[in-house]
Structures are given as C-alpha cells and as structure tokens.
Image: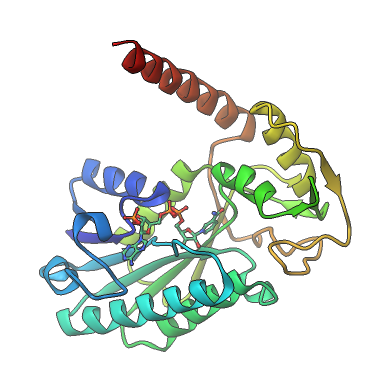
Amino acid sequence: MKIVVIGGTGLIGSKLVKKLGEQGHEAIAAAPNTGVNTITGEGLAQVLKGASVVVDVSNSPDWEESAVLKFFEKSTRNLLTYEAATGIRHHVALSVVGTQQLSESGYFRAKIVQENLIKASSIPYSIVHATQFFEFLKGLADISMVGDKVHLPPVLFQPMAADDVASALARVAIGQPVNGVVEIGGPEQFRVDDLVRRRLASIKDPREVIADPNARYDGAKVSEKTLVPGNNARLGETRFETWLTQSAVVRVATNEKESRKKAS
Ligand SMILES: NC(=O)c1ccc[n+]([C@@H]2O[C@H](COP(=O)([O-])OP(=O)(O)OC[C@H]3O[C@@H](n4cnc5c(N)ncnc54)[C@H](OP(=O)(O)O)[C@@H]3O)[C@@H](O)[C@H]2O)c1
C-alpha cells in the first residue's frame, strides 16, 4: 500500500516511515525538504498519485498563536482538497489527548481547527490523540518558564515514547478508518511537575521546577485529568526509566561520533 507521511522527516514521521517500510508498505516521507509543502501546495499532487492513505504528522515551524493557526488551517485545507481530488481512502492525523479542553491555548485552538476540518471533509478519517512524548519534556519546561523557574501544575500525566506513538500510528494507518478519535498513551501515570523535574535532572539541566496549582499548560487551565487518556486508550510499552536509559545511550553514542568527527 502506498502511504504518504506528511511531516515524514520529523520526530514521529521519520520513525513512522521506517516502521511502515519494514512492514512492506511504500511509505513516502513528504516535507518541504523532500519537495512537498502543504502550505504552498508544491509537490502535493505528485506525491499523492497512487496513494491510498495519508498520515499527517506535520507541525508548525512557528508556535506563535496566529502563525500556528494559519499553519494548521491552510495546511489541512490544502491536504484535504488534494486528497479528495486524488481519491485518498483514509486520512490519519496526529493530535493531542485533551485537545478539546485546551482551547485557552493558541496552539490547541489551531489543533481544534485542524480536527474540525478533517471531521467536516468527505474523506474517511482517523484522528489519533496521543499524550505528550517523553522527547517533549524538556520542551515543556521551556514553554513553562516564569522568570528563571519552570512552573507546572501538579496534575496527572501519562506521556509516552515517540517510538510507541509511531507504532500505534502505523497500526491505525493500515487499518480501517474509524471516523472518530483513537486515544493512545504511556503505560504509567505521573505528576507533570515531578516528571519534568526528573527529565531535567537526567540531562543536568539546573532549572528548578515549581509545582504551582495556578500554573497553566501552554496557556490553558488544566484539571487533574485533562492530560490523561480515557480507559479505552491503547497504551505503549516503553516505561519512562527504560526510555531514559535508552536515550542516555543514544546521547553518549552521538557525542562520541561528534568528537571523532572533530578529531579527524
Ligand atoms: N509534542 C508532543 O508531546 C505531542 C503530543 C501529541 C501529539 N503531537 C502532535 O504530533 C505532531 C508531530 O510532532 P513532531 O514532534 O513529530 O513534529 P516535528 O518533529 O517538529 O516535525 C514536523 C514535520 O512537519 C514538517 N513540516 C513543516 N512544515 C511543513 C509544510 N509546510 N509542509 C509539509 N510538511 C511540513 C517538517 O518538515 P521540515 O523538517 O522539512 O520542516 C517535519 O517533517 C504534531 O502535529 C503535534 O501536534 C505532539
């Protein structure tokens, strides 16, 4: 089956393209640096030719409120228009658990617009709501700064490894459209502040993390369960400590490679 992965060069997209390829599918990574741009339309008609499924795991390069809204609106409209013209049978998009409750955040308002466009289109679809990626924990600290400290609400949190996100997406992409939302999450629950503190400590980031009940999540008020999936969620296998160990090994290997490159 030919499957086009929009954002196929990104964190999730590159893992997804690899997994689909290993399963015998023709998986194409579509992104500006492979000649496909969902904003300008460049390369879209060509890449969709002969494809059955499109998986959209793209992200806006700019998270400023109006830029991110423009990105998801324009990109999704273009994609759906080209998909309808080429007869795509299944549109899969990656979004976030709790999106509908996070509309105080500019980023999540843009994701809501993306989801609504997909639901209103004529193309059968599956929207995958994932919890936060372990790989995003440092980024979460970066967007939660008050002065020189990280302020986070101590609410429940069930993040997952990007690799497990890609595996779940691959399963959805080769399955039948659900015309609804599939939730996926990690195997363990934590408190947001606690896990971000542990992640920063693991990379020797000295920033202090404050458990602040009034702190917002990317600008949105959250309650105890906003960020955790429901009981029917499909759960990934990778536990946080396992992921930490694996990512430390990768970091050491990458540093050694860099040092060898500099020395030669
Ligand atoms: N972060 C989280 O914890 C989390 C949780 C749940 C869901 N999500 C969702 O997961 C999705 C993917 O996130 P990610 O971290 O894998 O993203 P990422 O690593 O930033 O990758 C984004 C991809 O989008 C591509 N892209 C950007 N502009 C494009 C355009 N005009 N046309 C086509 N492709 C374009 C990029 O291509 P270039 O590299 O060429 O620019 C890149 O391949 C997002 O939609 C996000 O909402 C994230």
Q: Position of residue 26 (x, y in %)?
A: 16, 53
- Please state, as top left, top right, bottom left or bottom right, where the C terminus lies in the image: top left
Q: Image check: 81 left or right of 138?
A: left
Residue at the image point whose x is 48% and y is 83% from the top: 116
Q: Position of residue 77 (x, y in %)?
A: 35, 83
Task: Indicate the quadrant of ligand 1 in the picture.
Answer: bottom left
Which of the 4 image quadrants contains residue 217? bottom right
Asked whether 121 or 6 is in front, the reply is 6
- Please state, as top left, top right, bottom left or bottom right, where the N terminus lies in the image: bottom left
Name above or below for residue 248 compared with residue 2.
Answer: above
Asked whether 36 or 249 is in front, the reply is 36
Residue at the image point whose x is 62% and y is 48% from the top: 159
Name above or below for residue 229 compared with residue 46.
Answer: above
Q: Image check: 114 left or right of 123?
A: right
Residue at the image point whose x is 71% and y is 51% from the top: 157
Q: Image check: 196 left or right of 10?
A: right
Q: Position of residue 203 (x, y in %)?
A: 64, 28
